[in-house]
Image: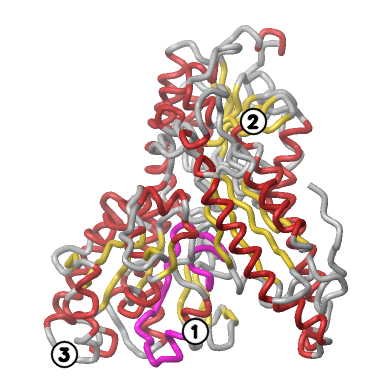
Amino acid sequence: IPERLQPSCSASTMRRSLGVLAEAYSKWERRAPLTPSHVSRLVNSGVEVLVQPSSKRVFTDREFAAAGATITRDLSGANTIMGVKQPLNSSLLPGKNYLFFSHVIKAQPENMPLLDEVLEKKVRLIDYECIREGGGGTTPRLVAFGEFAGMSGMVNGLRGLGLRLLSLGHSTPFLSIGPTHAYTDYSTDARRALRAAGEQVARAGLPAEYSPLVVCVAGTGNVSRGALDALDSLGEVVERVAPSELARLSALAGTAGEHQHKVYVCVTGAQDFVRPARPGAAFDRAEYYANPEEYVPCFHETIAPHVSLLVPTMYWDRRFPRLLSTDQLQSLRASGNKRLLAVADLTCDVDGAVEPLVRSTTIDEPFFVYDPATRTEQADLDGPGVLMLGVDILPAELPREASAHFAQALLPFLDALATPGAPLSAELSAATIAEAGALAPAYGYIGALREARERDEESQRALSGRDAALRHHLSEAEARAVAGSTVLRLNGHLFDSGLINAALDVVEAAGGRFDLLEVTVRPNESTGREPASSLRQKSSALMQLTLDAGRAPLDAVLSQLQALAARMPLAEASVVELPEHCGGVYDRTIPGSAGGGGGRSDHTR
């Protein structure tokens, strides 16, 4: 299709225009932020739409051209340029508005070069992930592919379960389920295959050795809804059960009966993942999200032992306890409990809520087996362990339906994005990560988080180069220093209230050394009149500290810090010890410590 003649760039400052990128993230990325039907509506309303040519996109160039788009590689005439996933590094046009899933808000290391380019070229970056109702920080997301990730991932998860059971010597109806991308569409073709598999389960049943078969969907958001839609498509064999019923089902394991002809589905939420650390306290959702360090994990004890297929769908970051750690899985398997056959992590959160997801997988090769006994993974699905799924572009397997849904959600924002100089809505303003060469105030924490991660990586590299055996040959003074060392998590209005500085003063006054391993800053907009307690967002810090005289003075400092938090109620702060965080290696605060990089005895703020 020949490119149409373009107006001059100076004319672009006056016209309403949008650009659509050709996706470069993966060969499987066939989605588009706009469909031809949405382009037609925009063109009819006076918006020019420029579309980069792509031979792999699910909608052809010819379809876009027929809808009125201009097919061109040059998007410089567009006021705003839209893609789905991250564009290639060094491809951003200076000074332009861009919308795509950037994956930078957790300071993801692999995307920091992209963020650097955004800042250097003074691009305004708006992230779909952050477009929320009313521009709130916790309100529902408005532009997302979540349900399609759930649908696609669940289809693949059931397929993987069938492959894993085959490796264990059992042919099951799940083998008849193909990869999601092989179906013409989800609504009819994929659902038809799921229904047929469910009917086979009803007729032939599942192996007694691995029955009752329990699928645990962890989370209750958009991804969860998509996963449950796919599970419900199995038909009448699906029976929903509450977490409290799981132990009863496990008692039937290995026996014959009606349970062999069922697929039990259990939906779990945050109240099932953790319990309050304080004895007798009740779970409080708001408190948990504000102060996760006040809770301890329990999922590995109460849910995981009864589950056949675990499906994480919820948001997770390192402030929260893991859903299932490698140690917990190893202990579970060592106890003789091997009911957990597979994990379909629909969030693809590597080293995240489910720690054994040690790498992402691809649409070409969606599975690997992780053996917690040896802490190794292998592509061969016949080996010992648990099958893992962690594809990071699951909605791309349903490109046509996912694109139509996404474009419809994006439609209300397009007029402002197409118009030069138009004010942005609250939703778009709050989703603006960077502009004019700087991070937006709400995302300023990315810089601090990035520095903390880079410093941690440097420390880990240093540790890997030392002989861990040295830890067992400590002098008496070194042993006292190790005993007097720990890691604390401080959470609250640390900076608004001044608590962080007061806490460091306490450590220094006791003759201690400290190092801030990680700082997560969540600034609050304030007029200066309201008290800190009215501010919703809290910051957190991980502090390594050492008292050379041993554990007794360390305990005294801990008591002083907890008393300090109690004396500053407006800080709404908590101080929690994490004694296992550094694995006994305190190289940041013990000069010349074994396994360390020499440590630092002087710390400035």
Q: CA distance from mark 3 to mark 1?
A: 28 Å
Q: CA distance from mark 2 to mark 3?
A: 60 Å
Q: Earlier in the sequence, mark 2 or mark 1?
A: 1
Q: Secondary structure at mark 3?
A: loop
On the image, which quarter does residue 16 sit in?
top right
Q: Amino acid at mark 3?
A: Ala
| Magenta stretch holds residue 223 | no
| Magenta stretch holds residue 339 | yes
Q: Residues within 10 Å of mark 2 (few under 14, many from 20)?
A: some
Q: Amino acid at mark 2?
A: Ala
Q: Which mark is residue 364?
A: none
Q: Earlier in the sequence, mark 3 or mark 1?
A: 3
Percent position of residue 205, x then y: 19, 81
The boundaries of the magenta stretch are: 331-356
Percent position of residue 370, x then y: 53, 79
On the image, which quarter does residue 332 sit in?
bottom left
Which of the colour schemes (rainbow, by chain, secondary structure, one colour) is used?
Answer: secondary structure
Residue at the (19%, 80%) spot, across then down:
248
The residue indicated by pointer 1 is 330
The residue indicated by pointer 3 is 256
Does the rendering let one see residue 592? yes
Q: Secondary structure at mark 1?
A: helix
Asked whether 365 or 325 is in front, the reply is 325
Q: Secondary structure at mark 2?
A: loop
The residue indicated by pointer 2 is 440
In front: label 2 or label 3: 2
Q: CA distance from mark 2 to mark 1?
A: 43 Å
Q: What secondary structure is the stretch in magenta mostly built from? A: loop
Q: Amino acid at mark 1?
A: Gln
